[in-house]
Image (cartoon, rainbow, N blue to C red):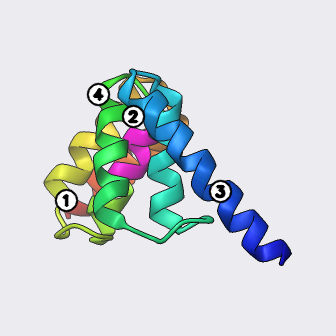
């Protein structure tokens, strides 16, 4: 019963964040990306995760840019693409996400070999 209540809460929470994201609340877009990427209380859906992360990244969410870069680097829900990964990791770095800078540098060095 408790699991059902949690899933029901997570789904209603996702709906409220979806409405907020559609209204331009970048945090909600980023949160939805994460919920869909990991299937946290809602069904896992990488296509939706990518979509919400892209919206949040375009809105200045460094975390979302980092997550997009990672998803493209490892081909999680999208075709693997180091070019796309570098693009989003560089955006994360420019938005002062330290992990984005580290990942960008690591992948760039790996491709220079």
Q: Which mark is residue 36?
A: none
Marks 3/2: CA distance?
28 Å
Residues marked 2 and 1 touching at CB (< 8 Å): no
Circle nearer the N terminus (4, 2) = 4
- Front-lying residue, 44 or 23: 23
- Residue labelled with disc 4: 58
**Where does residue 87 sit, x and y in percent of width and height?**
21, 41
**Where does residue 111 sit, x and y in percent of width and height?**
20, 60
| Secondary structure category for the residue under label 3 | helix
Marks 1/3: CA distance?
33 Å
Marks 4/2: CA distance?
11 Å
Q: Which mark is residue 82?
A: 1
Circle nearer the N terminus (1, 3) = 3
Q: Closer to the camera: disc 4 or disc 2?
A: 4
Q: Residue at x 42, y 50 (%)?
A: 67
| Secondary structure category for the residue under label 1 | helix
Circle nearer the N terminus (4, 3) = 3
Circle nearer the N terminus (4, 1) = 4
Can residue 96 be found in the magenta stretch? no
**Where does residue 22 sit, x and y in percent of width and height?**
36, 29
Q: Residue at x 17, y 62 (%)?
A: 81
- Residue labelled with disc 3: 10
Can residue 64 be found in the magenta stretch? yes
Q: Closer to the camera: disc 4 or disc 1?
A: 4
Q: Closer to the camera: disc 1 or disc 3?
A: 3
Q: Which residues lie in the magenta part?
A: 63-68
- Front-lying residue, 34 or 16: 16
| Secondary structure category for the residue under label 2 | helix
Marks 4/1: CA distance?
19 Å
- Residue labelled with disc 2: 92
């Amino acid at each position: 019963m408790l699991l059902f209540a949690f899933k029901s809460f997570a789904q209603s929470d996702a709906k409220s964040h979806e409405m907020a994201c559609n209204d331009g609340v970048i945090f909600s877009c980023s949160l939805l990306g994460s919920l869909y990427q990991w299937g946290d209380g809602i069904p896992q859906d990488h296509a939706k995760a990518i979509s919400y992360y892209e919206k949040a990244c375009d809105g200045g969410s460094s975390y979302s840019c980092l997550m997009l870069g990672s998803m493209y680097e490892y081909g999680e829900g999208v075709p693997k693409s180091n070019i796309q990964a570098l693009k989003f990791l560089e955006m994360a770095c420019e938005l002062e996400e330290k992990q984005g800078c580290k990942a960008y540098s690591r992948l760039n060095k790996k491709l220079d070999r």
